[in-house]
Image (spheres, rainbow, N blue to C red):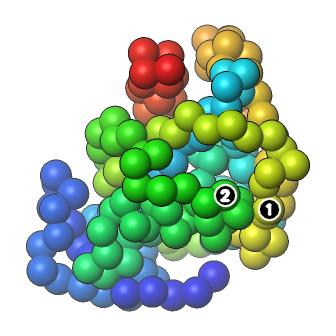
């Protein structure tokens, strides 16, 4: 995966004025920001992507519709639009993105990556079927739609081993936001 210059952020996700390459931030466990974009269609189905098998973190697991690091000096909404377009080939406009907040997660991976991220989270209601999705092979190996209620049931029964191990509270936060907003 390509290295990129990113902002180091404080506990609230605000840039500190320090920038490093993503690989260095991961090696040292420096806090940085990412965007998570959750897409749900008019049938209340969430789009999940399956991470490519050669990803450095959580290869082959199902994850948020689109996600990625925010580049140095990049606006989070611009990063969100870029990631959705790059990873799943869906064109959105800034007005489509509904900001629902931020979430902090820290994962230490077996390959010496320490991922300390503030996720800036957006949700989007969109007319979409799987045929509308164009996968970026380097990042994503598959996509699927899952009814919101099915995902909620999987969480309740703890049947989520095929998903990226985000905090359970994170997943409940997403479900609550999708349910209350749409």
Q: Position of residue 41 (x, y in %)?
A: 67, 31
What crowding class fits label 2: few (fewer than 14 Cα within 10 Å), some (14-19), or many (20 or more)? some
Is residue 128 shown left or right of residue 108?
right
Disc 1 designates what residue? 134
Tell me, for residue 180, which label it has, or none. none
Q: Position of residue 74 (x, y in %)?
A: 31, 75
- Quarter of the rendering containing residue 27: bottom left
* 3 is higher (above) or lower (below) than 65: below
Disc 2 designates what residue? 90
Q: Position of residue 178 (x, y in %)?
A: 49, 24
Distance between the alpha carbons at the discs numbered 2 and 1: 7 Å
Outermost left residue: 16
Q: Are marks 2 and 1 in contact (CB under 8 Å)?
A: yes
Number of numbered discs overlaid on the protein picture = 2
Report if residue 2 is visible in the image: yes
What crowding class fits label 1: few (fewer than 14 Cα within 10 Å), some (14-19), or many (20 or more)? some
Q: Which residue is located at x 48 percent, y 56 percent?
A: 93
Q: 124 and 147: which one is in front?
A: 124
Q: Position of residue 33 (x, y in %)?
A: 33, 63
Q: Secondary structure at mark 1?
A: loop
- Quarter of the rendering containing residue 127: top right
Q: Which residue is located at x 70 percent, y 63 percent?
A: 89
Q: Secondary structure at mark 2?
A: loop
Is residue 62 shown left or right of residue 76?
right
Q: Which residue is located at x 37 percent, y 60 percent?
A: 77
* 168 is higher (above) or lower (below) than 22: above
Q: 175 and 89: which one is in front?
A: 89
Q: Which residue is located at x 52 percent, y 39 percent?
A: 124
């Amino acid at each position: 995966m390509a290295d990129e210059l990113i902002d180091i952020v404080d506990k609230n996700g605000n840039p500190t004025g320090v920038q490093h390459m993503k690989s260095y931030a991961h090696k040292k466990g420096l806090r940085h920001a990412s965007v998570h974009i959750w897409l749900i269609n008019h049938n209340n189905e969430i789009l999940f992507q399956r991470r490519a098998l050669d990803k450095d973190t959580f290869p082959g697991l199902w994850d948020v519709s689109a996600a990625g690091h925010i580049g140095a000096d990049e606006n989070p909404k611009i990063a969100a639009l870029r990631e959705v377009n790059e990873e799943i080939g869906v064109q959105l406009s800034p007005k489509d993105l509904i900001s629902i907040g931020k979430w902090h997660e820290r994962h230490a991976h077996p390959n010496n990556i320490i991922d300390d991220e503030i996720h800036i989270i957006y949700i989007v209601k969109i007319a979409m079927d799987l045929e509308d999705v164009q996968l970026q092979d380097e990042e994503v190996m598959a996509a699927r739609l899952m009814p919101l209620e099915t995902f909620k049931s999987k969480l309740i029964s703890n049947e989520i081993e095929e998903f990226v191990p985000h905090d359970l509270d994170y997943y409940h936060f997403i479900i609550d936001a999708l349910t209350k907003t749409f």
